[in-house]
Image: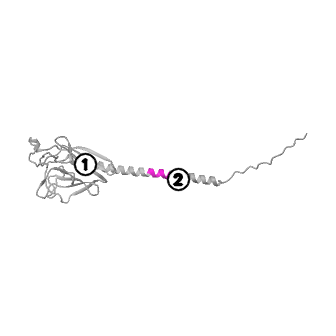
Amino acid sequence: MVAITCARPPVPRRANQAGFTLIEAVISLFLLAVMSVMSYQAVEVILDSNERSRGDLADEAQLHRAWQIISRDMMHLRPRGFADGFGSAERAYLTDPSDFGVRFSRGGGPMVRSNPTGVSRIEYRLNDDNQLERLSWPITASARDEESSRVVLVDNVDKVEIEQLSRSNIFSPDWPPINESHDLLSLPKMIRITITLASGAETSRLLPGLDFDPGSATGSDSGTGENAN
């Protein structure tokens, strides 16, 4: 008996194909686009983070320098009045939150011909450009509005709060404190300064004053000075 089989034609093997099909090419392009977008976003995040870090470092450096200057000034407070050039004398230390910030007499400066006492008048204020600035002029100057030395300490400042410790151990933005009478030469014993930046960052320092009040030392609240009101 002879077995008869039906032979199937051999299936030709495809040679190694070169290139991609259309679907494969579209999928590859889609994946490449997705990876490109993700890479760009990652790079953008890193660049933004670096920029913020540089800005934060610059703010910290400004604040560090400002606190050094402010601390040195407060360490050299002097009970020295000031002829304002308008027929009256300013207190050795005074504040007005609605006007200028704080103004006081500072010693420890160089004794030169233009300022033989080494005592200067210092003012801290927030200007129209939202900058904390420091002004200084010789105590011998006849007028407060005479041309002064001006230094910008901190940029992009939202507000500055300056508070003084009163006799009743309460921090007050006014010096002399409301309802307290102080000598013209009286100085606070503690000063608290808070700087708030436009970014919302806040920094504060509690600085020692001089705790000088001739009126209080004699047992009289009014002493030789004016009434705070």
Disc 1 marks a residue whose amino acid type is Glu
* Residue 225 point in image, percent of width and height: 10, 48
Helix, strand or loop at label 1? It is: strand
Figure coloring: one colour
In the rendered structure, does residue 227 fall within the stretch colored magenta?
A: no
In the rendered structure, does residue 42 fall within the stretch colored magenta?
A: yes
* Residue 162 point in image, percent of width and height: 23, 48
Pick whichever, 80 or 39, lies toward us: 39
The image quarter in which residue 180 lies: top left
Task: Quarter of the image for the N terminus: give it.
Answer: top right
Helix, strand or loop at label 2? It is: helix
Badge 1 vs badge 2, beta-carbon distance below 8 Å: no
Q: Residues within 10 Å of mark 1 (few under 14, many from 20)?
A: some
- Magenta span main SS: helix
Q: Residues within 10 Å of mark 2 (few under 14, many from 20)?
A: few
Disc 2 marks a residue whose amino acid type is Ser
Q: Residue at x 36, y 49 (%)?
A: 56
Q: Earlier in the sequence, mark 1 or mark 2?
A: 2
In the image as oriented, which residue stretches furthest toward the right?
1
Mark nearer the viewer, 1 or 2: 1
Q: Residue at x 51, y 53 (%)?
A: 37
* Residue 55 point in image, percent of width and height: 36, 51
Q: Residue at x 27, y 50 (%)?
A: 66
Pointer 2: what residue? 36
Residues in magenta, as a range: 39-46
* Residue 205 point in image, percent of width and height: 26, 44
Pointer 1: what residue? 161
User: What separation in Å lies between label 1 and label 2 (alpha carbons)?
Assistant: 49 Å
